[in-house]
Amino acid sequence: MYAAEVFGVLAVRGSDSSTAVAAATRKCFKIAAFATPTSSNGVSLRWAKGLAPCGCTVDSKSVGDDVFSVTPSNKSDVDYLGESTKGIDGHASLEGPIEKVARSEAREAEDLLKDLGIPSPSSSRNSPRGIFCSRTLNLRSISAIGYDMDYTLIQYNVTAWEGRAYDYCMENLKNMGFPVDGLAFDPDLVIRGLVIDKEKGNLVKADRFGYIKRAMHGTKMLSTRAVSEMYGRELVDLRKESRWEFLNTLFSVSEAVAYMQMVDRLDDGTIPADLALDYKGLYKAVGKALFWAHVEGRLKSEIMSKPELFVEPDPELPLALLDQKEAGKKLLLITNSDFLYTDKMMRHSFNRFLPNDMGWRDLFDIVIVSARKPEFFQMSHPMYEVVTGEGLMRPCFKAQTGGLYSGGSAQMVENSLDIHGDEILYVGDHIYTDVSQSKVHLRWRTALICRELEEEYSALIGSRSYRESLVELINQKEVVGDLFNQLRLALQRRSKDRPAQTLAATNMNDEDLTDSMQKLLIVMQRLDEKIAPMLEADGELFSSRWGFLSRAGLWDKSHLMRQIEKYADIYTSRVSNFLYYTPFMYFRSQEQNLAHDSYTYYCSQQLYNENSS
């Protein structure tokens, strides 16, 4: 029976299990352990001794005629990175150097997956829909996974959703006396990760240190010189909330577009003088208009009446969560949306793709609506149980499995599940509300959903040759510049009646020295003429105004990318990408390059060449 269970797991979804078994028996199984955390005791399945057709022996005892033995896991160790190995039990006696054995076993496992029609794990990592790791995360050590809903589980069509939010915002602004005629929603005007400067009426893009690299006043991009003159002595500091507003999420798009367009109207004198607004006051007015667009209910009522116009369906999403649930993970839905809206969106997006008449509620152990994040992670609020389909509630003090609740706090969830801190992974799209606060206050593990990553990844691949050409030009200029500077230093020392770097440089004819310098200077100027427009155009495949989402200039990371690295353990474009991994995945962060790494590599190569000669 155990063999049938494991072969059933290996089989391609929807295919005949006998086909998978036949394919599997053609291979030599020498796998150390199969773990299934669905049991509360933690049960592991191991190959019985003498099973492998290649003659390999396995350290386990056969039980009757069963193929596998069942061994309770009574200890929880950690691996070399300090991550839990809970659920892994048993070791196979595989002879030979482990490096050779590992390569051999990996090849056979890859062949097996190919026979079974299962994509290789590496194909998922190297794709626009990969899951990227900032801090090592072992999903085996995760007992519960919490999800945000809007722009996380539910992916909206940005142009449709934010376009309607913009329309309602503009209608409210018009009622407040603002001139809005002739304005239309332009989603290409802004991208996530920009920062609004409420004092100057600008939208800026900063690098990881806070230095501003690009800026737009109203809807007009500023020149590099204007940016330098305006912000040369200033850094973006997100702690100064009275001035800087970070665009954390796609929900910020409609607000930013409306504000920048209204800055143009303020500058040209179209806004009535009796409103007496500066740029900061204008931002408050736009924010108020958008707030009422959400609160008054017309926007959400329109979306609920025709969700197919606003929601992008993802048939793989429910299956990804189903894998996690069947692997023993507690699944939580924690959203700021109210119950009626949540139920409508989740029914539309999940129910038709779930098997066996399952409903979306069947996936989640606990559902919390109107959570009031980020306060949900920061402090305690009363919790109410939603007891009717119309959303009627009653007070309660502890969440129960299968329950539907409103409000409460993250600590209530931890106490109800008896799961705490880094045993919980929270997945959301808002860097501050979802990711930052759950990590800072509770030490939950975190995952950020950034839908634009797919387009960003493809744009980076598409511009690879362009960026390589640009880097080559910059390297050429660096070499020429170094040569010019050495000649300049020689000339400087000679002009002060001091010897140059070498005797030959000291005795060189002045005319020859200046002539060489002049030629190099002309080369640098011509290189600059070619490099400058290429730098301006870098990233146009993603955004013609702002360049790449994750980059600020050719070399550095954007402020957004710094926030992602700081607060998100993993990040990806959509939740359904988990389907291409397993609920037991070990996400390992990459080695972080340091400024001196290239020099140490160069020295090691030089040493190797010397020893070889």
Image: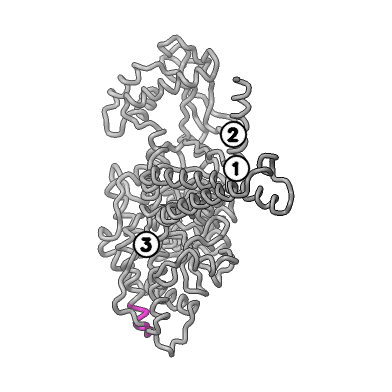
Quadrant housing the C terminus = top right
**Label 3 sits on what residue type?**
Thr
Where's residue 138, x and y in %?
52, 38
Task: Specify the farthest residue to the bottom.
Answer: 274
Which of labels 3 and 1 is toward the front?
Answer: 1
Residue under the point 72% across and 54% down: 496
Q: How many marks?
A: 3
Where's residue 566, x and y in %?
56, 51
Residue 106 shows up from this direction:
yes
Label 1 crowd (10 A; few <14 / some 14-19 / many >=20)? few
Where's residue 381, x and y in %?
54, 64
Check contact, mark 2 vs mark 3: CB within 8 A: no
Which portion, as a residue range, is magenta?
Answer: 171-178
Residue 75 among those drawn in magenta: no
Residue occupied by mark 3: 388
Label 3 crowd (10 A; few <14 / some 14-19 / many >=20)? few
Q: Secondary structure at mark 3?
A: loop
Sequence-wise, the earlier of marks 3 and 1 is 3
- Front residue of this view, candidates 186 and 146: 186
Residue occupied by mark 1: 594
- Front residue of this view, candidates 429 and 420: 429
Q: Quadrant of residue 110?
A: top left
Instruction: Relative to 486, say whether 300 is above or below.
Output: below
Q: Main secondary structure of the magenta part?
A: helix
Check contact, mark 3 vs mark 1: CB within 8 A: no
Where's residue 199, x and y in %?
52, 74
Residue under the point 27% across and 30% down: 15
**Label 1 sits on what residue type?**
Leu
Residue occupied by mark 2: 601
- Front residue of this view, candidates 182 and 267: 267
